[in-house]
Image (cartoon, rainbow, N blue to C red):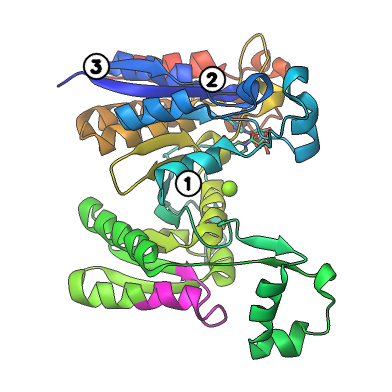
Amino acid sequence: MTKRTIVALPGDGIGAIVLKEAIRVLDAAGFDADYVYGDIGWEFWCSEGNPLPKRTIDLISEHKIALFGAITSKPKDDAAAELSPELQGKGFVYSSPIVTLRQHFGLDICVRPCRSYKGNPLNFVRRGKKGDIEEPFVDVVIFRQNTEGLYGGVEWTNPPAQVYDALMTHPKFRDNFGWCPKEELAVSTRIFTHKYTERIVRAAFDHAVRYGYKSVTVCEKPNVIRETSGMMWKIAKEMQKADYPQIKLMNTNIDAQMMWLTKNPEDYGVIVAGNMFGDIVSDAFAGLIGGLGFACSAQFSADGIGVFEPTHGSAPKYADYATPIVNPVAMIESACMMLDYIDEKELATKIRNAIAAVVEEGEVKSYDMMKLSGCQEVIDNGAASTVEMTNAIIAKLR
Ligand code: NAI
Ligand code: MG
């Protein structure tokens, strides 16, 4: 095993707490790496006017693989008010470092696996035909296009004349929205490009083949959003026929998928969607397997940059506890995705097995697994702290 250099981006709040625990697990599992720490987050916005300084971008460019905790974002007015006094009025405008990361490195592929751990008290259960309780095994991987679509940022309130005039050339706009004064219009675009739609769909099929999933489901709404969802569906159909005949291709509408989610979640394997629907469907499936304490994710670019992070944010209300209580599993699972990516699959399996053993045994449980609401007292009520949860996982490594 060659020694790796990993960029560690703790960020804010519990991001820093869980990242530290993930690195402890990686070390204990025998992953040989140097960690170089990169600055990101609110502190750097306040002190430098930039939550993602160039030195951090350079570190990621150099080493390509980053483990990221989470950051805090605040509304525009708060951002302006918290900027250090000597920077105020100098034209600094806050923008989310996560979005900047995605755009700068072209992290167009977002992967979010949602797999239930046996014995997790947070697993979804439903009533069976005979009134019995069923606990379907969920093993779904969502491929979310990460840079385009409704989150592409191409939007206007009171659009400029050229945009307005262009919209007016569309009969549906003219007939249905032409009555509205321009100043009262807000428009957010949903742009899909063939290149990046094809990339996310291919990534989904490749993953299905590599990890033995039987189906790929396009979760969009092509019957209504004909141009963009329609493009993804068409690409998927052609690609399946040409290159992946052994994988079953399915098509669900995002709204129906939300309903089927609790009816037959075990019927889905790989799901692929645009940016916003991918965001929705991944949060929804995460809810079936334990929620934010278990939801991990990875983002990749075409040139091999990988950023691995839990889906959750910085949870500021839990950031300053004398004994941290948050569940480190989402971050540790994200680190396992990193290990998969850099071909350290044995180590990833070892860590996942250790998590599985702790969850199944059920003796050490973080507060979320005990269905307690978060407060410092959960520790007195028997919840494992963040560190104890990590220790239990480390103890099961073999
Ligand atoms: P959040 O994900 O930070 O927390 C929401 C709630 O989820 C928490 O209050 C807690 O009850 C639960 N939770 C989160 N992580 C958990 C864990 N590891 N174990 C157990 N429970 C956990 O989302 P919120 O409160 O909406 O946002 C807080 C800050 O985080 C905001 O500034 C937001 O902008 C930022 N954010 C950052 C993200 C990122 O860095 N990728 C993603 C989402 C939010
Ligand atoms: Mg989300």
Q: Would you name the residue on which mark 2 appears?
A: 16
Looking at the rendered structure, the secondary structure element under dot 3 is: loop
Q: Which numbered disc flags the more N-terminal residue, 1 or 2?
A: 2
Which residue is painted at 51% across and 14% down in the image?
387
User: Is disc 2 surrounded by few (<14), some (14 to 19) or many (20+) residues within 10 Å?
Assistant: some
Which residue is painted at 24% across and 34% down in the image?
342
Q: Would you name the residue on which mark 3 appears?
A: 32
Occupied quadrant, residue 76: top right
Left or right: 241 in relation to 122: left
Occupied quadrant, residue 269: bottom left
Q: Camera-side residue: 225 or 384? A: 225
Residue 377: percent from left, percent from top: 72, 16
Q: Which numbered disc flags the more N-terminal residue, 1 or 3?
A: 3
Looking at the rendered structure, the secondary structure element under dot 1 is: helix
CB at disc 3 and ligand 1 closer than 8 Å: no
The amino acid pointed to by label 1 is: Gln
Q: CA distance from mark 1 to mark 3?
A: 30 Å
> What span is colored magenta in the figure?
219-234
The amino acid pointed to by label 2 is: Ala
Residue 310: percent from left, percent from top: 49, 35
From this view, report whether residue 389 is shown above or below residue 182.
above
User: Could you tell me if residue 295 is visible in this image?
Assistant: no
Is-magenta flag for residue 222? yes
Which quadrant does the N terminus fall into? top left
User: Could you tell me if residue 128 is visible in this image?
Assistant: yes
Which residue is painted at 25% across and 68% down in the image?
247
Q: Would you name the residue on which mark 1 appears?
A: 103
Q: Camera-side residue: 134 or 74? A: 74
Which quadrant does the C terminus fall into? top left
The amino acid pointed to by label 3 is: Asp
Which residue is painted at 76% across and 82% down in the image?
177
